[in-house]
Image (cartoon, rainbow, N blue to C red):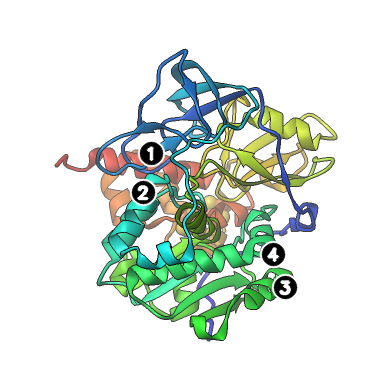
């Protein structure tokens, strides 16, 4: 039984631009810029130097602590190891690879038979997942092996998040339609790690073909249920999805494991299959390139490190883009330098024209209160905005700003077009900076 959640909005889905477009291979460009920071946690330290030859899938960065390695997405020669623009708006140490277009695979990448996989222990599986550089691919980029290991003994419910509620984005929808058996296989690996014989795949009711393919890929003996949820934004947000599937509420400041749940994005789950069965690290992913001014929106299988410019050129635009977003229009980050490249967390590039609602701004609050009604976290966005503008740390704390999931529902409903989410991202950083250092 699936439940809905408080608040939320119904933005125009605009999925029609790309939902019927099969995933196409995007040819790797001549030059790839692979950021050393593609996950939450410690950035990788480069393991290669300028002039060195690298093979496809070779580890080129790693570090201790909360970290997963980064791998070369093509074979070629390291042209530079230097700071380059990142989709997070900062610069990031990156390995620049001149592609030799030979796709010569690292010999360490070896597939495993079912018999070999069956013999792997949970610890060995988590080590494989770490070495493959797998992170939350819905945008969160939290290292997956840490989510797994920290949930051992606490998690009784696994949910694969195939919600993909953001407007325009269809990458996970296409993945479920075209790669359902691999997704189910990855989920069975997660079930083995947690020692559970049941799991959920949660998906919105606006993806009927994906639901059909998932159900077709599941054997009744697998213990996997497909939960079809009503389409409502932000259904794909972790806490809202947990509530919709289990009716359990993750407490303020808590993690899903606090209520016995672990949520894995659909693409992450498929990446687990690839790592365990094919030995393949996370070096490419599906990216939806779409938007109201796109001539030919697409779902592309893109090597990590591909410049946004090349992907935008591939779909074409009918006018000069007014706004280019890494991700969707609700939660994504506007980009100011199109030399930025894709990373493990980039599921979409959204290209908007000047007349698009998501691009409008006229920031004067008229105190209508619509933002409060829309907030699925029961927060008071208008007061949080004022507190952030005044850098009032105590007020931001008392308004529980850190509980904001940055879903953008408030900004979407705000008739004044106030950039509330940007303000809360800044405010949350101010709060973290003000916390006592351990
Ligand atoms: S305050 Fe945060 S959680 Fe609430 S609607 Fe706005 S962005 Fe979403
Ligand atoms: S929705 Fe916008 S205009 Fe209305 S109270 Fe909230 S911030 Fe102010």
Looking at the image, which residue is at 46% across and 62% down?
Answer: 264
| Residue 434 figure quarter | top left
Q: Residue 66 appears at what percent x and percent y?
A: 29, 44
Question: Is residue 147 something that shows in the picture?
Answer: no
Seen in the picture, residue 258 relative to 3 is either above or below; the reply is above
Q: CA distance from mark 3 to mark 2?
A: 33 Å
Q: Are marks 2 and 1 in contact (CB under 8 Å)?
A: yes
Mark sitting earlier along the chain (4/3)? 4
Seen in the picture, residue 80 relative to 163 is either above or below; the reply is above
Identify the disc placed on residue 78.
none
Identify the disc placed on residue 130.
2
Q: Nearer the viewer, residue 17 or 284?
A: 284
Q: CA distance from mark 1 to mark 4?
A: 29 Å
- Is disc 4 surrounded by few (<14), some (14 to 19) or many (20+) residues within 10 Å? many
Mark sitting earlier along the chain (1/4)? 1
Mark sitting earlier along the chain (3/2)? 2
- Is disc 2 surrounded by few (<14), some (14 to 19) or many (20+) residues within 10 Å? many
Whether disc 4's CB lies below 8 Å from ligand 1 is answered: no
Mark sitting earlier along the chain (3/1)? 1
- Is disc 3 surrounded by few (<14), some (14 to 19) or many (20+) residues within 10 Å? some
Q: Are marks 3 and 1 in contact (CB under 8 Å)?
A: no
Q: CA distance from mark 4 to mark 3?
A: 9 Å
Q: Residue 422 appears at what percent x and percent y?
A: 49, 41
Give the secondary structure at mark 4: helix
Mark sitting earlier along the chain (2/1)? 1
Q: State which quarter of the image contains the C terminus.
A: top left
Identify the disc placed on residue 208.
3
Find disc 4 in the rendering and name its residue. 177
């Amino acid at each position: 039984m699936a439940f809905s959640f408080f608040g939320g909005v119904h933005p125009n889905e605009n999925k029609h631009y790309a939902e019927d477009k099969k995933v196409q291979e995007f040819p790797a460009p001549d030059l790839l810029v692979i950021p050393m920071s593609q996950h939450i946690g410690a950035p990788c330290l480069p393991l290669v130097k300028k002039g060195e030859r690298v093979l496809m899938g070779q580890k080129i960065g790693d570090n201790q602590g909360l970290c997963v390695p980064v791998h070369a997405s093509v074979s070629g020669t390291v042209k530079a190891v230097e700071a380059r623009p990142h989709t997070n708006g900062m610069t990031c140490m990156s390995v620049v690879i001149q592609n030799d277009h030979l796709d010569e695979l690292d010999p360490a990448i070896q597939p495993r038979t079912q018999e070999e996989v069956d013999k792997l222990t949970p610890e060995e599986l988590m080590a494989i997942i770490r070495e493959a550089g797998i992170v939350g691919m819905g945008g969160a980029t939290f290292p997956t092996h840490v989510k797994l290991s920290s949930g051992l003994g606490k998690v009784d419910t696994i949910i694969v998040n195939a919600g993909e509620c953001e407007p325009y984005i269809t990458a996970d929808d296409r993945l479920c339609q075209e790669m359902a058996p691999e997704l189910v296989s990855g989920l069975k690996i997660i079930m083995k790690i947690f020692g559970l014989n049941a799991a959920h795949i949660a998906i919105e009711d606006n993806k009927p073909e994906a639901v059909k393919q998932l159900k077709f890929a599941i054997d009744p003996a697998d213990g996997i249920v497909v939960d079809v949820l009503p389409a409502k934004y932000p259904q794909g947000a972790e806490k809202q999805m947990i509530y919709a599937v289990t009716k359990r509420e993750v407490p303020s400041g808590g993690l899903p494991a606090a209520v016995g749940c672990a949520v894995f994005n659909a693409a992450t789950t498929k990446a687990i299959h690839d790592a365990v069965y094919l030995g393949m690290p996370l070096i490419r992913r599906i990216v939806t390139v779409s938007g109201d001014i796109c001539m030919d929106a697409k779902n592309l299988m893109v090597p990590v490190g591909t410049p946004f410019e090349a992907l935008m050129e591939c779909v074409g635009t009918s006018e000069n883009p007014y706004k280019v977003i890494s991700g969707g229009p609700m939660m994504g980050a506007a980009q100011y330098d199109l030399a930025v490249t894709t990373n493990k967390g980039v599921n979409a590039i959204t290209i908007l024209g000047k007349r698009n609602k998501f691009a409008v701004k006229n920031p004067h609050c008229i105190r209508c209160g619509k933002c409060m009604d829309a907030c699925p976290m029961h927060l008071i966005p208008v007061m949080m905005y004022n507190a952030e503008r005044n850098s009032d740390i105590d007020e931001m704390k008392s308004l529980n700003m850190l509980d904001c999931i940055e879903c953008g529902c408030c900004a979407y409903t705000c008739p004044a077009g106030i950039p509330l989410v940007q303000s809360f991202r800044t405010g949350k950083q101010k709060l973290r900076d003000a916390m006592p250092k351990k």
